[in-house]
Image (tube, helix red, strand yellow):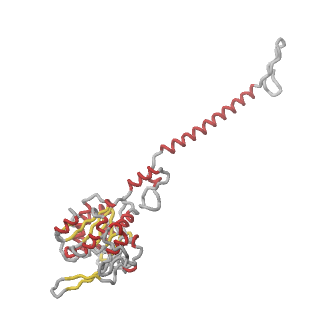
Amino acid sequence: MEGRDGGYLVAADTNKPPIMVLNIGFRTRQSLHKTIQYSSGFFVLLVAFICIITLFTRPTTPGALRGSGGGRGGQWSAAGLDGRQAERLHSEDQLELDDIFISVKTTSKFHGTRLSVILETWFNLAKNQITFFTDQEDPELDERLGEGKLVPTPCPVDHSRHALACKMQHEINAFLATDKKWFCHFDDDQYVNVPRLLTKLREFPVSMAWYLGKPSIPDQLQIQDKESGDTQKRIKFWFGTGGAGFCLSRPLTDQLARHASGRRFISVSEKLRLPDDVTMGYIVSILAGVELKRVEEFHSHLEPLHLVKDLHNQISFSYSETTTTSSSGAASYRYSNSNIVEAGLTEFSLSDDPTRFKSIHCRLFRETVTWCPQKIR
């Protein structure tokens, strides 16, 4: 029998007790609602489970971890890592002192003067990383420095353009024969704050080409373009003065090998008639297309050194020196007090420490030596 609501009713048997009539459509809808509820709950749990598994098992990419500030330009950031993971990644990417090749250019007549104060001071901060390039053998100095730390080149003993370029050539070749990550050049009239140098280099990703230094002129150097047939054509570039020190990263030196290895550096210097530091600037800036990155913490004798402050954060220092000639024709050297680092240094008198290197060393690393005065003068 068809009911009023469109459903079908079951007629009661007149021979049996009456029973409740069920609406089949209503019971079906109730079952469907329960099925939907159970399915939704299961789906939510499944999504949550997948998210948890993905979070703990997905691979970590450098791009996701690379920070934009502090430390080396591309140094790992600890964001999203536990302590052990961050420490491991940091140590793998951390530049160490042994990754730096420090070359010091000198000459035999300064072995007993300029080198003496270096050996007494900042040389002890990086004995295994420093190599001296000179022009004559010196068995006594060689023994004091250790095997391979004094390189007697066949370069002239004078201060000519060729002599300077020749020693720079030997410095470059020596570095290219190593697996070091940075080449840093300094002169024998400089003091180098080695820990600060390391800290500075860590700011630059070693996988990139870097030319770090400080120019000694206010504008770019302009020279004639000898590669061009036009004698009026000029090129200009920045160069880091050797008197302040400069550093090249391994990718850059590898790129420069075809222009500067073997005897090529000397050839470029002679062709352009430029000194060694300017030749380096030309090769890096013009031939390799890498611009100088100015580092203000480098200081040379070509700037007013009395303005240098905050010694702990500086990298290199220098001093002025004048030359006089005796009646016998022999050259003698005396230090000029007109251009030295002052910065309130009173550890030694000017007569006891004319370069101010001993005073600087005591100010920065007093705990590493025993000869610093107990009381500041």
Residue 169 locus on image (x, y percent): 23, 68
Q: Quadrant of residue 180?
A: bottom left
Residue 233 visible in image? no
Q: Hey, which quadrant is residue 47 in on the image?
A: top right
Q: Residue at x 28, y 70 (%)?
A: 120
Work out whether 13 lies above or below 155. above
Left or right: where does residue 199 sit relative to residue 104? Answer: right
Q: Residue furthest bottom?
A: 327
Position of 239 with respect to 2 (left or right) is left
Left or right of 330 on screen, residue 102:
right
Query: Which quadrant is the N terminus positioned in?
Result: top right
Residue sitting farthest toward the front: 374
Q: Position of residue 84 (x, y in %)?
A: 44, 50
Is residue 109 or residue 217 the one in the foreground? 109
User: How many numbered callouts?
Assistant: 0
Foreground of the two, 118 or 315 = 118
Q: Quadrant of the C terminus?
A: bottom left
96 or 118, nearer to the observer = 118
Q: Quadrant of residue 151?
A: bottom left
Point out the residue furthest to the left here.
328
Q: Position of residue 175 (x, y in %)?
A: 26, 62
On screen, 91 above or below 343? above
Residue sitting at 35 percent across and 59 percent down? 96
Residue occupying the far right of the picture = 14
| x 48%, y 51%: residue | 81
Q: Position of residue 346 (x, y in %)?
A: 37, 78
Q: Is residue 142 visible?
A: yes
